[in-house]
Image (cartoon, helix red, strand yellow):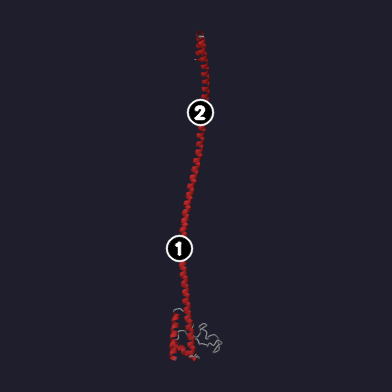
Amino acid sequence: EVGDLKEKLDKCEADLEKARKANELSLLPLSSFQSVATTEKWIGEGNDDNEDGHMIVPRIPAGVSGTALAASLLRDGWSLAKMFEKYQEVADALRHERWERKHSEAILERVLHEIEEKAELILDERAQHEKMVEAYSLMSQKLQEALSVHDTYENTIRTLKENFHLELQKVTDEAAAKVEAVLRRSEEQGRMLESLHTSVAMYKRLYDEERRSRSLIPHSAEPILGIAMRSCH
């Protein structure tokens, strides 16, 4: 049984040494489980057993073999059962520490993975945002160009309307003047026609009177008719 315990202690020492070298767990020498290496007690000083039932462990330099450590602890009053109990405590603490480390690494890995995924989403959203900004800039530029063309069209239409109104007013004035001249000439021609009608009626009346006069006095009326004809000429 003692040989088995020594083998287990040697194995524990080897595991602890590997763990220490791999920086998985910073273990203090077995001479101090809860204080710095220079302390020579477990928790209290001056008593073989403190209030928690822990025994004082003499300070053993690091790197001492498991056999020498076991012999030293046996000389200091440690039983094999006590050493195995402390070995189990240390082994459990080591396993718990390893589990905590793996758990923390898993959490960190998951967080890192989430950050990477979110980073990809953020990059995609940023790329989409840049595309939208570029599209908005292009649309804004086209809108400005369209507004400029619209203003040009409005100015052109305004100018054309003004020119059209001026030309229409000019044509209207000219047409009104022509109509007025035509009406004036028409009135003059009407008056001339009326005068001609009056003259014709008068001449006709004179002619009829002359004919009647000639029919009544043929010889005496000829001089009068000649005078009337000369007066007409």
Q: Report the residue marked by disc 1.
A: 124
Q: How many marks?
A: 2
Residue 108 visible? The answer is yes
Residue 187 in percent (x, y) is at: 53, 26
As drawn, which residue projects farthest toward the front?
Answer: 216
Residue for point 43% across, 89% down? 4
Residue 29 visible in the shown view = no
Give the mark toward the camera: 2 or 1: 2
Q: Nearer the viewer, residue 84 or 128?
A: 128
- Label 2 crowd (10 A; few <14 / some 14-19 / many >=20): few
Q: CA distance from mark 2 to mark 1?
A: 83 Å
Q: Nearer the viewer, residue 107 or 27?
A: 107
Inspect the image, locate mark 1, and give the three-letter code of the amino acid beneath it.
Answer: Asp
Q: Which mark is residue 102?
A: none
Q: First in sequence: mark 2 or mark 1?
A: 1
Looking at the rendered structure, the kind of residue marked 2 is Val
Residue sitting at 46 percent across and 89 percent down?
A: 70
* Closer to the camera in the image, 142 or 66: 142
Q: What mark, if any, has residue 182 been given in the picture? A: 2
Numbered disc 1: secondary structure: helix
Q: Residue furthest right?
A: 51
Which of 148/174 is in front?
Answer: 174
Q: Residue 33: where, in percent of width, then height?
A: 51, 84
- Place of residue 100 in the rendered image (x, y in percent of width and height, measured from the top left): 48, 78
The relative height of residue 17 versus residue 128 in the rendered view (above or below) is below
